[in-house]
Image: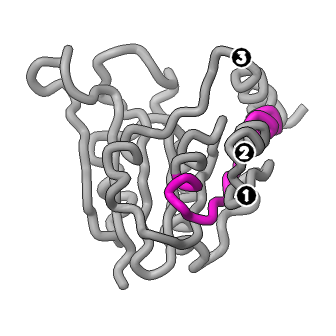
Amino acid sequence: MTEIDTIRRQWDSRHADPELQPKAAEVLRENRHLLPAHGQALDLACGLGGNAILLAEAGLEVSAWDLSSIAIEQLLQSVAQRDLSNLNPEVRDVEKSPPPPNSFDVITVSFFLDRPLIPHLISSLRPGGVIFYQTFSRIAVTDRGPTNPDFRLGENELLGLFSPLSVRFYREEGRLGDTSQGVRDIAMLVAQKPV
């Protein structure tokens, strides 16, 4: 069994949990007003498709990609229940098949970190395109998220990874102040490709 097969099985097992429901990432929910009125969107590593559903309901044409066939099957059921003909789920290994250049007006990524893929994400944005990105940071208050620090962002790392883009929103609170409040354990970014 290859490493990718092992990863796929882990995600298939997780997405088979009937208690899980699709939920859009906080960075997208809080900044929905920054979405364009129309265009092509990608929910990368979409899981159950919370971001994809929000984007489709906002009127965008949405591609939703994930390695897990179980996640995509669940999302296809959500598409049928909500009659979202503008949402197209697909099983896809984004490391082997990254998005093509200049193909999306919006990209969402939540709780997936593959640093070598980020230049492809930037390239795949059309001029004026926007990325909504949220994932775990190493400076954490709780133990949620991956234990391997390679799958967590260093302090302000997200700003550096997307430095060719213009930042429209950024949040990373670390352990500052009252850690029982606010947004902890994650970094969030909305950034736009220059026109």
Mark-to-mark CA distance, 1 and 3:
24 Å
Amino acid, disc 1: Ser
How packed is label 3: few (under 14 Cα within 10 Å), some, or many (20 or more)?
Answer: few
Q: Residue furthest bottom?
A: 195
Mark-to-mark CA distance, 2 and 1:
7 Å
Nearer the camera: disc 1 or disc 3: 1
Q: Is residue 129 above or below residue 179?
A: below
How packed is label 1: few (under 14 Cα within 10 Å), some, or many (20 or more)?
Answer: few
Q: Which residue in the protein does label 3 denote?
A: 18
**Circle 3 SS class:** loop
Specify the label residue 79 is tagged with.
2
How packed is label 2: few (under 14 Cα within 10 Å), some, or many (20 or more)?
Answer: many
Q: Residue at x 50, y 42 (%)?
A: 110
Q: Where is residue 191 shown, x and y percent of the image?
A: 34, 63
Query: How are the residues colored?
Result: one colour
Left or right: residue 34 versus residue 111 is: left
Mark-to-mark CA distance, 2 and 3:
17 Å
Left or right: residue 3 versus residue 123 is: right
Nearest to the observer: residue 123 or residue 44: 44
Q: Is residue 104 above or below residue 78?
A: below
Q: Which residue in the protein does label 1 denote?
A: 85
Residue contact between numbered discs 2 and 1, judged by CB atoms under 8 Å: yes
Magenta stretch: give its range: 55-74
- Which is nearer the N-term, disc 2 or disc 3? 3
**Circle 1 SS class:** loop
- Which is nearer the N-term, disc 2 or disc 1? 2
Does residue 56 show up magenta in the picture?
Answer: yes
Q: Where is residue 98 shown, x and y percent of the image?
A: 67, 63
